[in-house]
Amino acid sequence: MKTSLKYLILIVLMTPYISRAQMPHDAIYMGKNQLCVAAMYGYSSWDHYWENTFKRENFNIGTLTTQSAMVMPAYGISKRVNVILSLPYVWTSASAGNLMGQKGVQDVSAWLKVKALQMGGFSLHGIVGGSIPIGSYVPDFMPMSIGMQCRTATLRLLANYKHPGTGLYLTAHGSYGWRSNIKLDRDSYLSDDRLYSTNQVKVPNVYDAAVRLGVLRKGWQTEVFAERSACLNGDNIRRNDMPFPTNNMQATLVGWYGKFQPRNVGVNARVGYVVDGQNVGQSTSYTVGLLYQISFKKKA
């Protein structure tokens, strides 16, 4: 905490200019040799979930809560090419029953975002990303698990239009994600009503799509969004059983995002709610973050 505080003070003193925070799903870029670090806290909870398409509750779990603390630096290689990293610490808990939650460092992720085309207010972006698990968490103890323990690779195409005068923008993206097999600490498992005598599990690949409508002005941003994510295949949660990494998990989420960053230090917040799903919890999620930016450009 002392080191983080010293770093924040150093940033405040060294960077008296307008800053912009960016994510892997937006059309905002850091300038060349600029670094923005986001420290974020996330909270998500649900007490109802979809067992296949049947919506139910489970009194052996009560309310499941997932919390996370994450650091996300973004660096401008150029004004059209940015790299983004993230590393979360995650912990889970249930309000009822005997299942103990997990906690620990999850997966390190990296994204490369490239502005491929700019024509007036319209822009087209290519984004490639991936993640590698670095924590020793257990993946097949769902819903208490903090992750899948699989390596991932994602390709994303993002289109954005921003009105030059008002700052009103519309963003849409689509992604495809590859996920590696995972290894369990047992010799067999059940999936799709079959018994597999192996400790290797094939995790389904995924896709996602989203649309965002908002306003981006100097120092602040606000938007509403809708996101859809789903596996390409997989089985369903068996009646009165626990979830498993092979499940076909699908979710539709709506929410709001806002940011206030008039200078080098800022804050952001996000609220999301799952309105429909399959083999997932109907969660309500909140995220708040602190943003601070520094420039490595040499002064004249």
Image (tube, rainbow, N blue to C red):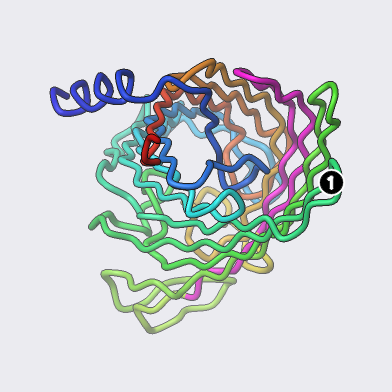
Q: Residue at x 52, y 71 (%)?
A: 191
Label the magenta part by its dominant secondary structure.
Answer: strand
> What residue lies at 66% left-to-right and 65% top-to-bottom?
176
Q: Residue at x 27, y 54 (%)?
A: 137
Q: Quadrant of the C terminus?
A: top left
Q: Who is closer to the viewer here, 107 or 143?
A: 107
The furthest residue to the bottom: 197
Circle 1: is it few (<14), some (14-19), or many (20+) Cα within 10 Å?
some
Comparing 248 with 22, the one in front is: 22
Q: Is residue 278 above or below residue 212?
A: below
Comparing 289 with 114, the one in front is 114
**Picture layout, residue 226 above or below residue 237:** above
Picture coordinates of residue 192 (x, y %)?
59, 71
The answer to whether 101 appears left or right of 151 in the picture is left
| Residue type of the residue flagged with mark 1 | Phe
Q: Quadrant of the N terminus?
A: top left
| Residue drawn at (38%, 25%) of the image | 15
Q: Secondary structure at mark 1?
A: strand
Q: Say whether residue 227 is magenta.
A: yes
Q: Nearer the viewer, residue 178 or 8?
A: 8
Name the residue that disc number 1 marks. Answer: 122
Boundaries of the magenta span: 202-230
In the rendered view, tell whether residue 182 sits above or below residue 121. below
Quadrant housing residue 157: bottom right
Q: Name the spot of residue 53 as percent of width and height, x first.
A: 72, 47
Q: Position of residue 70 (x, y in %)?
A: 36, 37
**Residue extending furthest toward the front:** 300
